[in-house]
Image: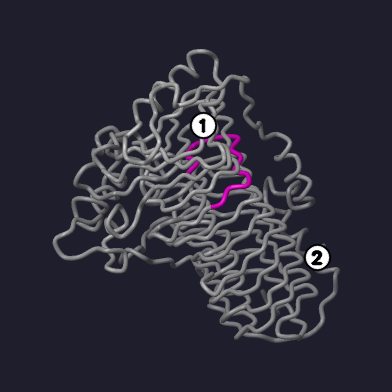
Amino acid sequence: MQNKLHRSFFSFSIVLVFAFLTNCSAQKGANAILANPWKVKQQIEKSVVVPVFVNKNYSIVDYGAKSGGLINNSEAFKKAIEACAKNGGGKVVIPSGKFLTGPIHLDNNVNLHLEAGAEILFSTKSSDYPLVRTSFEGTELMNHSPLIYAYNKKNVAVTGKGILNGQADNDNWWYWCGAKQYGWAEGRGNQNDPQNRIRLVESGEQNVPVDERIYGEGSYLRPNFIEFFGCTDALIKDVKIINAPFWVIHPMKSTNVTVDGVTVESHGPNNDGCDPEYSKNVIIKNCTFNTGDDCIAIKAGKDGDGRRVAMKSENIIVKDCKMLDGHGGVVMGSEMTGGIKNVFVENCAMDSPNLDRAIRIKSNSRRGGIVENVFVRNIKVGQVKEAVLRINMFYNVYGNQTGNYIPQVKNVILENVKVKNGGKYGVLAQGYKELPIENVLLKNVTIEKVGEAYSIDNVKNIQFINTYINGKKVASPKGL
């Protein structure tokens, strides 16, 4: 029976924290992390290897690069990277100035370093981007190369105080999404043609080999901006990234990834700030996200292709970040078929009239997947539109998304969260009767100016400890 619940308020004993964790800890394999999640988070941090590079510099100018933004310097970038890798690695340096180029492919032990005042302008000619193995919305394919790409590499980085400019706008890349607000008009191609995105999703369902999923020119599937695919020990530090065609930072099947001090300002369609997918041990810290879609969205493949790969995204740490515009601050899904495990979010600030939700988990029964062990603490939220915590297992954006793979969510804990303007709901959660959302805890949470404390369907064991909404202490629902 569905439990449709709305606010009720009374005090609750702290003893329930122990009861909550005891109940959660009965789940196989969950004992250690639920007993002391932040200790586990520290252990994960210590295990992440940050790349170290030989102290050698290779300036692109020495390989023929010309500034000004008019001459394509692809060959100069390629030669500098090849020389750097051949000689044991180091920095490929972009000095102050504007340098136009096509896609940049990194190699082992190479740090692409932008000095202060440097700006890389990426070509807007789709024909400049060759086919590589990549991913589009959670399905692998052969498509246009990401703007910066590393495939099966080790010890790679993009660093420095310069700017990475994808030059996407309503005339370049963005209109491919098929939305008029991003420049699409009748007669212009777009991803929604049945031979494009729809065909790709079907190929994933039919398990077509990835190297036979040929797209690229005429398919209108936009490339990611920075993609580490199958990499180990990768770093993105300090750069500013603007005007992305699609997802901005995309660690894909990678391990030990650090995103530190990066600023993302890009308001195009699907302009997620950072999307770790099938990746393990990822730290995102000291960053600012001002985006056209989710600020951070943790992924794990979509539908049939996600079941083929069957890899989790796990041990994801987000700390000391600032989220401005975006559909969600920290999001899990909707491409989460492989599963997401052990997410830690702390010491972040989220605030914008254009920020829809603070923490969000989304999937559907076509996608499936499990999200477990999400720990959030010390968060300050100025304003959100819809909800502070949103869990939606019926997410639907491309027509009918129902199937036979009911998604799971369990163990979501929010502590020490302060919200000035909570929008419509403190907690808005919708699960399945067959597989309810399990174990949601809000402890030491204060939410002001919110329409309703909570609205939940099919949630098992939700508790409020020392939580105040609109100035009143919230009681845990009975019978759940």
- The dominant secondary structure in magenta is strand
**In front here: 395 or 20?**
395
Q: Marks 1/2: CA distance?
A: 47 Å
Position above or below: 28 against 480:
above
For the point 66% across and 31% down, which residue is it?
A: 49
Q: Please tell me whether mark 2 sits on a helix, a strand or a loop.
A: helix
Report the span colored magenta.
Answer: 250-263
Circle 1 or circle 2, nearest the eye? 1
For the point 68% across and 59% down, which residue is it?
A: 348
Which amino acid type is marked by label 1?
Answer: Leu
What x and y, as percent, mark residue 81? 45, 23
Closer to the chain start, of discs 1 and 2, is: 2
Position above or below: 474 against 242:
below
**Count of labels shown?**
2
Among the 4 quarters of the image, the one containing residue 233: top right
Residue 19 has which mark? none
Residue 262 colored magenta? yes
What x and y, as percent, mark residue 388? 61, 71
**Residue marked by disc 2:** 17
Which amino acid type is marked by label 2?
Answer: Val
**In front here: 480 or 304?**
304
**Residue marked by disc 1:** 112
* Placement of the C terminus among the 4 image quadrants: bottom right
Among the 4 quarters of the image, the one containing residue 143: top left
Residue 319 colored magenta? no
What x and y, as percent, mark residue 206? 27, 44
